[in-house]
Image (spheres, rainbow, N blue to C red):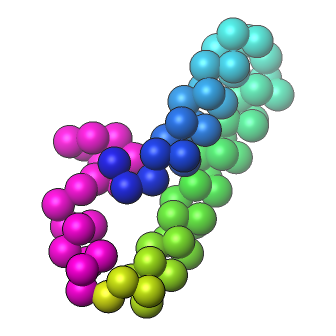
């Protein structure tokens, strides 16, 4: 998993939303789900510029957020 902090944050947000069971929590979850791919794209560009082909090779082997899936 290349971005464990984002995966952890998403997991916490979903868990809290389920625990609270409110519409506000659902909106926060949707906002988080929408923002995370944007932030990952920015971070990936920085990592590629810093580490080049080595990071590109790594990113081909390792999923972004969910092991073996995404």
Q: In this view, does 19 lie above or below 41?
A: above
Tell me: 64 left or right of 63.
right
Q: Residue at x 59, y 65 (%)?
A: 39
Asked whether 47 or 69 is in front, the reply is 47
x and y percent of residue 25 in the render?
A: 76, 26
Magenta-drawn stretch contains 29: no
Asked whether 21 or 63 is in front, the reply is 63
Count numbered badges in the picture. 0
Q: Is residue 51 above or below residue 64?
A: below
Q: In this view, does 25 lie above or below 45?
A: above
Tell me: 61 left or right of 16.
left
Tell me: 53 left or right of 36.
left
x and y percent of residue 22 in the render?
A: 79, 17
x and y percent of residue 42 in the render?
A: 55, 75
Q: Residue at x 27, y 41 (%)?
A: 67
On the question of residue 45 being in view, the answer is no
Q: Which residue is drawn at 43% across and 89% down?
A: 49
Magenta-drawn stretch contains 56: yes
Tell me: 25 left or right of 10.
right
On the question of residue 49 being in view, the answer is yes
Q: Which residue is drawn at 75% across and 36% down?
A: 27
Residue bounds of the magenta highlight: 53-70
Asked whether 43 or 27 is in front, the reply is 43
Q: Is residue 25 above or below residue 58?
A: above
């Amino acid at each position: 998993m290349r971005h464990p902090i984002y995966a952890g944050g998403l997991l916490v947000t979903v868990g809290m939303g389920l625990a609270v069971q409110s519409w506000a929590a659902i909106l926060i979850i949707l906002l988080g789900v929408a923002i995370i791919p944007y932030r990952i794209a920015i971070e990936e560009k920085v990592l590629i510029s810093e580490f080049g082909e080595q990071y590109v090779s790594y990113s081909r082997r390792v999923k972004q957020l969910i092991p073996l899936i995404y």
